[in-house]
Image (cartoon, rainbow, N blue to C red):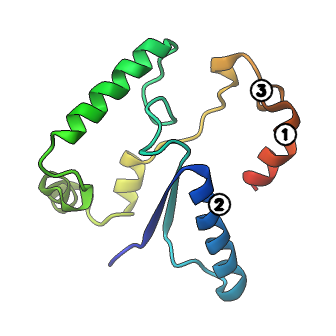
Amino acid sequence: SKLKVAVAHGLGNARKILDKVKKQLEENGESEYAFVEIMACPGGCVGGGGQPYHSSIAMRARRGEGLYKEDSELPERASHHNQAILNLYEDFLGEPGSEKAHHLLHTNYFKRSVLTGKSIEEATGAHKKHLEKAVE
């Protein structure tokens, strides 16, 4: 079985994907995508959710430089063509989207106020309504 996914880099592209999904849901009751990944930063955020948390800006910058350098030198950069990933699914995880794959590979949202000392409302101020709409 195949899953169709969408990945949006940057918030402008995220809006386009979300508008497309919303239109599909209104017209057909379902979306063509099984999963949508939205990354605010082009290429993903080095200090984003699911990544090790570092309070030091210099540490995040060094981590980003290292990740981008390592990735640029890899012979196979597309995970769906990477033989190690294909073997992992075949030998251990089963199908993409399986219960085991979901349990082991997916991350969860954690309230960041513990890290910042501010609630989302305090941190966003005037953008509170926009944020609430974005996460409906």
Q: Position of residue 111 (x, y in %)?
A: 66, 31
Q: Quadrant of the C terminus?
A: bottom right
Q: Nearer the viewer, residue 44 or 25?
A: 44
Q: Which residue is mark 1?
A: 128
Residue drawn at 17 percent across, 62 percent down: 90
Q: Position of residue 63 (x, y in %)?
A: 35, 23
**Measured along the vertical axis of the image, is residue 40 above or below residue 20?**
above
**Measured along the vertical axis of the image, is residue 30 above or below residue 53?**
below
Q: CA distance from mark 3 to mark 1?
A: 9 Å
Which of the two discs, 2 and 3, sits closer to the camera? Answer: 2
Picture mark count: 3
Q: Which residue is mark 2?
A: 15
Q: Residues within 10 Å of mark 2 (few under 14, many from 20)?
A: some
Q: Amino acid at mark 1?
A: Lys
- Residue found at the very far bottom of the displayed protein: 28
- Which of the two discs, 2 and 3, labels the residue nearer the N terminus? 2
**Do tag 2 and tag 3 residues touch (Cβ < 8 Å)?**
no
Residue drawn at 29 percent across, 32 percent down: 67
Q: CA distance from mark 2 to mark 1?
A: 18 Å
Residue drawn at 83 percent across, 25 percent down: 122
Residue 86: which quarter of the image? bottom left
Q: Residues within 10 Å of mark 3 (few under 14, many from 20)?
A: few
Q: Amino acid at mark 3?
A: Ala
Q: Is residue 67 left or right of residue 37?
A: left
Residue drawn at 49 percent across, 64 percent down: 35
Q: Amino acid at mark 2?
A: Arg
